[in-house]
Image: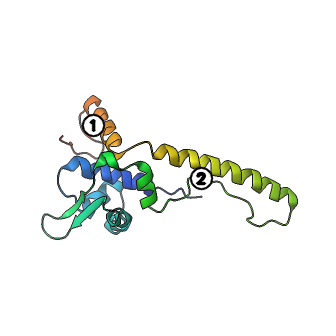
Amino acid sequence: MKRDSKLSSVLHVLLHMADAGRPLTSDELAGYLDTNPVVVRRTLAGMRERGYVASEKGHGGGWTIACDLAAVTLRDVYEAVGAPSVLALDHRSENPACLVEQAVNAALDEAFREAEALLVARLGEVTLADLARDFTRRFKHHKQHHHTHGRRHEH
């Protein structure tokens, strides 16, 4: 089963946008994710609708952060990308006739709900500012002082 990486991708480009200090084009952001600019625009659409990012067309345009990083949690971003399922596990059959499988599904349902609630609650405890601080700390302690995308990020 393919894992959903939308949350990770959006967080990745948000940190690049926060660090850049200038608008970043969809092409630049696509380069960070090794994907197509159309995918970036589609992925950031939900973020723009909630006012977390803004985009300007034309020369000097691009994507920028439009929110206070300390006020937006990972849970906010998770919800903005459509609250994808946090678990790759699922039932063998949604509506089984077999009573054994019904019992298995009931037990799994409870465990899935508890695990998802725990993860979503944890996402609500971490802000984009927390991530930005962690990146800055890692950057300062990195021996080569350049980011793995091959460009030096100035602060």
Q: Quadrant of residue 63?
A: bottom left
User: Which residue is rendered at x = 27% and y = 41% of the image?
Assistant: 147
At numbered mark 1, what does the secondary structure look like: helix, strand or loop?
helix
Q: Earlier in the sequence, mark 2 or mark 1?
A: 2
Residue 143 showing in the rendered view: no
Which amino acid type is marked by label 1?
Thr
Q: Position of residue 42 (x, y in %)?
A: 37, 68
Residue at the image point whose x is 25% and y is 63% from the top: 54
Q: Quadrant of the C terminus?
A: top left
How packed mark 1 is, by other alpha carbons closer than 10 Å (few <14, some 14-19, many 20 or more), is some
Q: Is residue 34 left or right of residue 147?
A: right
Vertical side of 94 occupied by 22: above or below: above
Closest to the observer: 44 or 59? 44
Amino acid type assigned to the residue bearing label 2 in the image: Leu
Q: Is residue 133 visible?
A: yes
x%, y% of residue 59? 12, 67
Labelled disc at residue 104: none
Query: How far across and down, in percent of the image, does residue 48 sit?
Result: 32, 64
Give the residue number, with chain letter if any, for mark 1. Answer: 136
Quadrant of the frame with the N terminus: bottom right
Image: 61 above or below 138: below
